Image (spheres, rainbow, N blue to C red):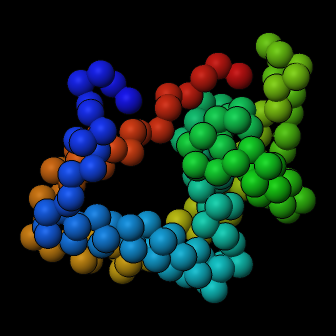
């Protein structure tokens, strides 16, 4: 806690509007990922976690990231990411390598089969995002929403050297 923030500042009740916003946001944090996951599982037999790993790898330099970076980007524990990546390795969608710079570091690399699978799944995910989120934002200033979310949910860290 900073010196400029007192414990009484932290205990200030939320206004009715703040409470409504917070509760709606908290519900969305739980329900939206579940809905996106269910749509991917039903249509493509892929979890949202698997999709997010493939997506992050597809956007990375050389289609590869440190395992710790994938975990950080996905907000998942290193052990959870390890299980997801192992599942993708078993399917031939990802391979694991050791870093050329530091042999102790595990690198996940998107295979060509993984990129093809991501391209096949993307339309399902996009439709789910539209149906579960974007279609409900009519009239909302999307740039303002994105700026607000970026303030309390910082953007993904930039890629690091492998």
Specify the quadrant that holds the N terminus: top left
Relative height, residue 24 to residue 80 (above, below): below
Residue found at x 58% / y 49%? 74
Residue 151 x %, y %: 29, 40
Q: Nearer the viewer, residue 1 or 155?
A: 1
Residue found at x 71% / y 78%? 45
Q: Which residue, as the protein is rendered here, is positioned at the far top?
A: 101
Where on the picture, by quarter, is residue 6?
top left
Residue 37 x %, y %: 58, 74
Q: Is residue 144 visible?
A: yes
Q: Nearer the viewer, residue 30 or 43?
A: 30
Where on the picture, by quarter, is residue 114?
bottom right
Residue found at x 31% / y 71%? 23
Q: How many marks?
A: 0
Task: Report the side of 65 relative to 129 (left or right).
Answer: right
Relative height, residue 137 to residue 146 (above, below): below
Residue found at x 12% / y 59%? 141
Residue 148 x %, y %: 23, 47
Q: Which residue, as the protein is rendered here, is positioned at the far bottom?
A: 42
Specify the quadrant that holds the C terminus: top right
Relative height, residue 49 to residue 148 (above, below): below
Q: Is residue 94 visible?
A: no
């Amino acid at each position: 806690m900073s010196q400029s923030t007192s414990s009484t500042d932290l205990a200030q009740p939320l206004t009715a509007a703040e409470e409504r916003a917070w509760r709606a946001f908290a519900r969305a944090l739980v329900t939206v990922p579940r809905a996106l996951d269910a749509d991917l599982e039903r249509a493509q037999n892929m979890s949202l976690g698997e999709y997010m790993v493939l997506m992050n790898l597809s956007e990375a330099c050389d289609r590869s990231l440190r395992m710790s970076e994938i975990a950080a980007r996905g907000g998942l524990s290193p052990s959870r990411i390890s299980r997801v990546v192992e599942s993708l390795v078993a399917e031939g969608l990802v391979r694991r390598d050791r870093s050329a710079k530091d042999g102790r570091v595990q690198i996940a690399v998107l295979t060509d089969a993984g990129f093809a699978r991501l391209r096949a799944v993307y339309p399902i995910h996009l439709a789910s995002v539209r149906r579960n989120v974007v279609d409900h934002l009519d009239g909302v200033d999307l740039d303002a929403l994105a700026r607000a979310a970026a303030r309390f949910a910082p953007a993904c860290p930039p890629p690091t050297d492998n």
